[in-house]
Amino acid sequence: MDLYDAILSRRSVRRYRDEPLDKNTLALIDDIVDHVRPLVPENRFRVLRRDVVSGEDLIAAMGGYGRILTPPHYLVGNTIGSRRPLVDLGYRMEQIAIQMVQLGISVCFIGSLGREENVRIRFRLNRESRFGAFLIFGRAADGITGRTINAVILRASSGASKLVVGDVFYNGSFKRAGVPPKALARIIDAGHAAPSANSVQPWRFLWRADTLYLFLRRQNSRYGSKPALQEYRCFDGGACMANVMMAMESTDLRGDWVLLDEGQPDVPVHPVELEPLAKLRLR
């Protein structure tokens, strides 16, 4: 499958065939993990690949595991660093997920930010490591029954309806959202197609002076009531950035993401409920 098609066609699958992938496919996945592109190269990135064994109790770590039926495998990605570790983690893990989809493998993220300590203990991770979500993968269940069950679980999990691109893209200023110009449409569509916890879609795009700025909403009740859960916006923002970067491979646009911090002089004026994440100067 074409990379751009994989970005747009990717769906969270929660009902899997109860059988493992073959060794050659697992070797391809290991190679994808080994060659994933970093957002922050100095951060330490590690991925554990695990097979789900019969009777294994992952509920304490995964939380949402009960809404995943017969998953054969999962990845435990984590990172250590002082520079946007969760953003970098989401950026890398989304690349892995999309390249799996290219291979015809079904995937689903299960967030565990509220259970990071349980994850560290269970998988013997460094106590400084940050963890955003498990990446479940395998072959989707066949037939009408499998697809129906998957659709029911997804509806129950996502809740509210999703935003459209016209809700999240701004041209010149944040006065009014609108439709991206034709030259940007493909990469904006790809970024907006990124997965997010509870379908929050925290990203907001601002196009200004040949530069695409990415902002995140600081708070959203759908992430949960605990302050730590609001950090999902960082993991989700990294996934959005990864989709934009991968989509650029199918266009004539070139550029590199540059992370931003609050108070930098080159950050455009923005609503107080948004925080700057990154900018992409396009060539």
Image: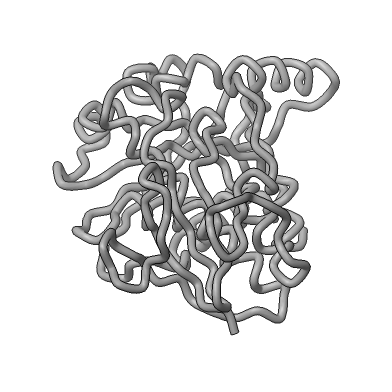
Q: Nearer the viewer, residue 80 or 168?
A: 168
In the visual, does 283 lie left or right of 179? left
- Most extreme residue toward the bottom is 283
Q: Nearer the viewer, residue 216 or 139?
A: 216
Tell me which colouring the rendered structure shows. Answer: one colour
Q: Who's the residue at 69% across and 67% down the image?
A: 184
Residue 79 pos. (x, y %): 28, 53
Using the image, determine if residue 43 lies above or below residue 161: below
Q: Nearer the viewer, residue 28 or 66?
A: 66
Q: Who's the residue at 47% across and 20% down the image?
A: 65
Residue 255 pos. (x, y %): 54, 79
Q: Who's the residue at 21% across and 58% down the image?
A: 81
Tell me if residue 160 can be seen: yes
- Most extreme residue toward the right is 144
In the visual, does 107 lie left or right of 140? left
Using the image, determine if residue 232 lies above or below residue 210: above
Residue 108 pos. (x, y %): 57, 35
Residue 263 pos. (x, y %): 26, 63
Q: Nearer the viewer, residue 250 or 211?
A: 211
Q: In which quarter of the image is the N terminus?
A: bottom right
Q: In which quarter of the image is the C terminus?
A: bottom right
- Most extreme residue toward the left is 127
User: Residue 123: which quarter of the image?
Assistant: top left
Tell me if residue 95 can be seen: no
Using the image, determine if residue 21 lies above or below residue 92: above
In the visual, does 272 lie left or right of 103? left
